[in-house]
Amino acid sequence: MSEEMVMGDVRLQERARRRRTARMARIFAFGLVGAVGVGIAFAALVAVTRIRQVVVVSSDPKLAEEVRQTIRVPAWANLTTSKLSLIAAQAERVPGVKCAGFQRKFPDRLIVTVEARVPRLAFEKNGRYLLVDEEGACIAWTTRPDQALLRVKGMGVKAEAGQRISGEWFDRSCTVAQALADAERFRPWTFDVGYPAELSVIAGSGARGIVGLSDDLERRVKVFAEAVADYEKQGKPIGLMELRTERPIIWPEDQRPDKAPAAQP
């Protein structure tokens, strides 16, 4: 092969290399411009979707306001890249909230939806009542619980709002509440656990039924509630009913043995 042919091949290869280099440079330049453009567009999107308003939705307006006051949104939070579940999780730290979810409302609004816990029991302590739901979650203290709630007296509850109650006495209280779910007429009902051997259910009328420590608790409570209603219809209000015996024993109000007779003048 002559020297001229070799030199020609070298020049061709050099031109091909230059063309490839130029092509790669153009591709890189276009990619860089594109990346910068995408970056600018993404930054603009993040800025536009920055959260400027949080709306809390709940069936309980007071709870919704409490949640709204509790939630803290970081200054950089936005609807595009932020982990919004962490913001919604703040709502679940409020004792009255059972669960919370969220919804994006573009361009800049976050909707937080909360499900309120429903009180089922009211544990009495020093004239105040701790509202507790069926899961044992403690919701709040009040001095005037709803008439529909079973009031539990004598337990000496030590929990606070935001904590949980569990164990035998909580389970027994739930059983009594379930047994009295349809006995609306004589609300509020009270479950007195101060003396375990003489566990009692007390109607709003004052009638007391001693149910005791029994695996048959639900049936005994229902029997007592039905008896209170039946005797009331007959105009013979029950004062006390003993349900620990084979056959229940009933005393009218003026003959109940658990109350001392009035002092004679």
Image (cartoon, helix red, strand yellow):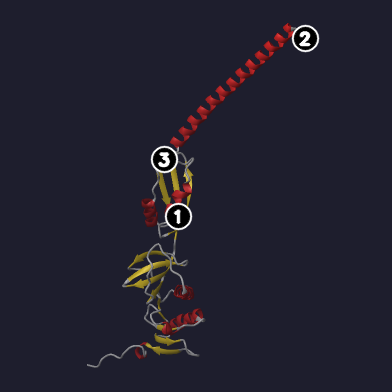
For label 2, the SS is loop
For label 1, the SS is strand
Q: Which residue is mark 2?
A: 1
Q: Amino acid at mark 1?
A: Val
Provide residue 116's location: percent of width, then percent of height.
44, 59
Q: What separation in Å lies between label 1 and label 2 (alpha carbons)?
A: 86 Å
Q: Nearer the viewer, mark 3 or mark 2?
A: 2
**Total numbered circles:** 3
Which of marks 2 and 3 precedes in the sequence?
2
Residue 9 image-quadrant placement: top right
Q: What separation in Å lies between label 3 and label 2 (alpha carbons)?
A: 71 Å
Provide residue 58's location: percent of width, then percent of height.
43, 55
Decide which of 74, 116 is in the foreground and name it: 74
Q: Which residue is mark 3?
A: 76
Q: Is residue 98 above or below residue 21?
A: below
Provide residue 20's location: percent of width, then percent of height.
64, 19
Q: Which residue is mark 1?
A: 114
Q: Is residue 56 above or below residue 117?
A: above
Q: Does residue 64 appear to the left or right of 1 in the view shown?
A: left
Q: Determine crowd level at label 2: few under 14, some 14-19, many 20+ residues with C-alpha closer than 10 A.
A: few
Q: Amino acid at mark 2?
A: Met
Provide residue 76's location: percent of width, then percent of height.
41, 40
| Badge 3 vs badge 1, beta-carbon distance below 8 Å | no
Q: Is residue 236 visible?
A: no
Q: Nearer the viewer, mark 1 or mark 2?
A: 2
Quick one: quadrant of the N terminus?
top right
Which residue shows up at 47% across the image and 87% down it? 244
Q: What separation in Å lies between label 3 and label 1 (alpha carbons)?
A: 24 Å
Decide which of 52, 203 is in the foreground and name it: 52
For label 3, the SS is loop
Which residue shows up at 48% across the image and 90% down it? 245
Q: Determine crowd level at label 3: few under 14, some 14-19, many 20+ residues with C-alpha closer than 10 A.
A: few
